[in-house]
Amino acid sequence: MRAKRLLNRIGLWFAVLMIVSPAVLFFVWMLSLSLKYEVDNAAYPPILIPENFAWANYAAVLESNRFGTYFLNSVLVTGSATLLGLLVGVPAGYGMARMKATKSAVVVLIARMTPGLSYLIPLFLLFQWLGLMGTLLPQIIIHLVITVPIIIWIMIGYFETTPLELEEAAVIDGASRWQVFRHVALPIAKPGITVAFILAVIFSWNNFVFGIVLAGRETRTLPVAVYNMISFEQLSWGPLAAGALLVTLPVLLLTVLAQRQIVAGLTAGAVKGG
């Protein structure tokens, strides 16, 4: 039995290593590029750990390319889209879960799986007609296409696992449906809301397509700003990798700090209650 458990554990760790290693290798190599001068980045055979770290790559990114402005734009777009998504998605998920609106849930899933370009073209024409192009408002609105379906889908699964006895007792005591949702369902659903919030932030923060089409020179977000560092004349791998890491750092820290809440929320939403 011990030998079998040991083999199962070894097999599990090997599978995890095979799945995770490409992502870890990519991150390590990007970190290596960001800390090397261009001579070392072009060296053959490749150099993983340089003798002298090129911290100037990070300083160049922070000092140029209006990094602070683009960071603030990303915070405003992602924060607004996530908060608005929670205001819409949490009550919608609760209603669909309690009404057992399976068909509506499938529609939400289809909306999440539909490519963003399908929404981008008609909304681009609408925003152009309204004269909103080049502002942050179109990006916030179109990012709701990302955040709302994610939040609704997660909250449907979570509310389906919460016990109905507490809500029924509140109704018997004379509480309205809104009071039941606000004072009973919401406190219980905090882990699910946390997971929905984190995933919405990650997907919205990393979005690139919407920003490059709708943003103006003053309203670009960080992924678009990193893309604009690529030029046909010269490609500097060090600053480019440093910029990419600085864009990834906020969501990486958020994920690491909230990993327990993510696991707890996803686990609670995966097991149906009685």
Image (tube, rainbow, N blue to C red):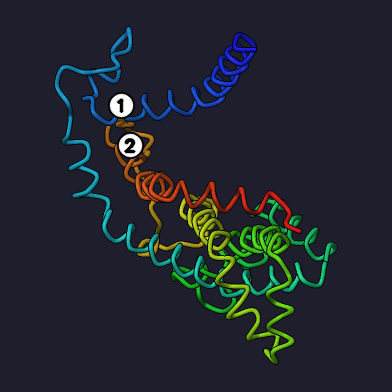
Please rate how many residues cluster around mark 2, counting C-alpha atoms within 10 Å: few if below 14, some from 14 to 19, many from 20. many
Residue 195, given in percent of the width and then of the height, sits at 54, 56
Which numbered disc covers residue 240?
2
* Location of residue 117 (image quadrant): bottom right
The numbered disc on residue 33 is 1
Single out the mark in the foreground, 1 or 2.
1
In the image, what residue type sits under mark 2? Answer: Leu
Q: Residue at x 73, y 74 (%)?
A: 95
Residue drawn 24% across and 24% down?
38
In-front residue for pair 113/86: 86
Image position of 168 with respect to 29: above or below: below
Q: Is residue 133 above or below residue 249?
A: below
Can see residue 214?
A: yes
Q: Residue furthest bottom?
A: 174
Res 246 → quadrant? top left
Q: Residues within 10 Å of mark 1 (few under 14, many from 20)?
A: many
Q: Residue at x 21, y 36 (%)?
A: 57
The answer to whether mark 1 and mark 2 are in CB contact below 8 A is yes
User: Which secondary structure, mark 1?
Assistant: helix
User: What residue sits 62% from the left and 70% below the top?
Assistant: 90
Image-based side of 48 in relation to 77, left or right: left
On the image, the x and y values in percent for residue 205 come to: 46, 54
- At which x and y percent is residue 32? 30, 25
Disc number at residue 151?
none
Residue type highlighted by circle 1:
Leu
Q: Eyeballing the image, is 221 above or below 54?
A: below
Q: Secondary structure at mark 2?
A: helix
Q: Quadrant of the C terminus?
A: bottom right
